[in-house]
Image (spheres, grey):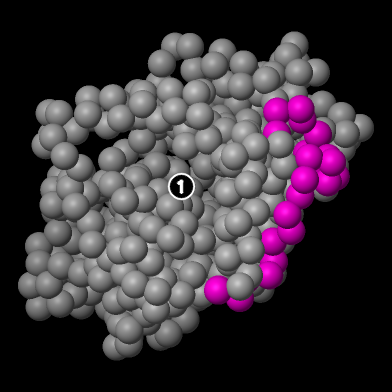
Amino acid sequence: MTGYEPSYYVASRNPGPRRHGLAGRVSTDVCVVGGGYAGLSAALELAERGFHVTLLEAALVGFGASGRNGGQMLNGLNPGVAAVEKLAGETASRAIWDMTVEATDIVRRRIQRHAIACDWRPGYVHAATKPSHFKAMVEDAEMMAARYGYHDQTVLDRAALAAHVVSERYHGGVFDHGGGHLHPLNYALGLAEAAETAGVVIHEDSRVTEIQEGPRPLVRTAHGEVDCAHVVLAANAYVGDLRPRLARTIMPVATFIIATEPLGAEVVNRLMPSNPCVSDSNFVLDYFRRSADHRILFGGGASYSGRTGPHEPMVMRGKMAKTFPELRDVKVEHFWGGLVDITANRLPDFGRLGDNLWYLQGFSGHGIALTNLAGKLVAEAVAGDAGRFDVFARLKHRPFPGGPLLRTPLLMAAMMWFRLRDLLS
């Protein structure tokens, strides 16, 4: 592995060590596969509970979605509590909601406790692209306060929205005081440092080629193997052939971000006065925020083929100009993409295979908070209390339809419909 894929985050990352690959045979309590947020969170939580932990990362810490995402930390789950209630019932939905609120608190406390320099800023705006979307947001905020006891949302009409984001594109929105944004790669690097301080051994350049299950699983790479009592599989979009059954229930989706040249404090303060992160209300959504050095980072779109098209930078520039017309001619200095894993129902997929192989995947766009929660829950389960882990594990997941050959074309067709709905509704 030569290094990270180019991005603004890589260009502005904090310095850190390069960790050597696994060589030979080692024995440990828990082997964690995957050096993104979920794996790092699990490793840290396990080590703090007294377990000996070895983490294997195929490339570099934060190489995948954990180091490339939009940096937006959100409460809740992708489809909302109504979908969870329909699938799991009101009691489970309330328990899951409370845990997702805990998830954002886990991130904030880790940043503070471990002094992670990741440009953390509080505040998230969900912006309505249509009057009907704003009406639904108001109703949802009222429901969340009345039934779920969540009072950290402020409804913003069009005039009030201008205190946070200034764009003619939006008809109002909701400000969530529990959300916020950060530099995702620097958070991953800080989490890795915290895990190592707690005693975790991290090996980069150590792609897992086989997991042999049994009372003492063996996790093999090209140059070594780990003998352990438990395996935590946190490969997400990269699980691939390691466990094909798990790969069938997630869809790796490519999403893209551009970063402008530095615009200066006056410009970004005028466009986004309160410095929140923002996402819109479309099904195929756009999301954006300010950086610490006064750029606009603008993301959105999705490639369900997993490939980057040649026109994606121009498409993203057009979306940014639609939101902020005065940025139409600014220079774009960085463009990058990466894979996120979604499930068919947009709910996270946690579970176990046998007695001692645990998996965490399917964060579906809410990964910053949920991955950190997932690591805590799986650590509780390995330590003997799987109660909270099993609340998520009981959520039902189905493979994407169409099998290996047809599921991508079918999903692409469905997404064309949703894009058309966004335009027409």
Taking depth in this image into account, of 336 and 75 the one nearest to the observer is 75
Taking depth in this image into account, of 8 and 19 the one nearest to the observer is 8
x%, y% of residue 353? 15, 67
x%, y% of residue 313? 54, 17
- Which quadrant of the view contains residue 220? bottom left
Q: Which residue is mark 1?
A: 365
Q: Residue furthest bottom?
A: 384
Q: Residue at x 63, y 47 (%)?
A: 135
x%, y% of residue 417? 36, 26
Residue 106 visible: no
Residue 162 part of the magenta segment = yes
Residue 248 part of the magenta segment = no
> Which residues are drawn in magenta?
147-170
Q: Residue at x 83, y 46 (%)?
A: 160
Taking depth in this image into account, of 360 and 415 the one nearest to the observer is 415
Q: Residue at x 64, y 44 (%)?
A: 134
x%, y% of residue 64? 42, 43
Circle 1 crowding by C-alpha within 10 Å: few under 14, some 14–19, many from 20: many
Give the amino acid at mark 1.
Gly
**In-image side of 259 versus 369 (left or right):** right
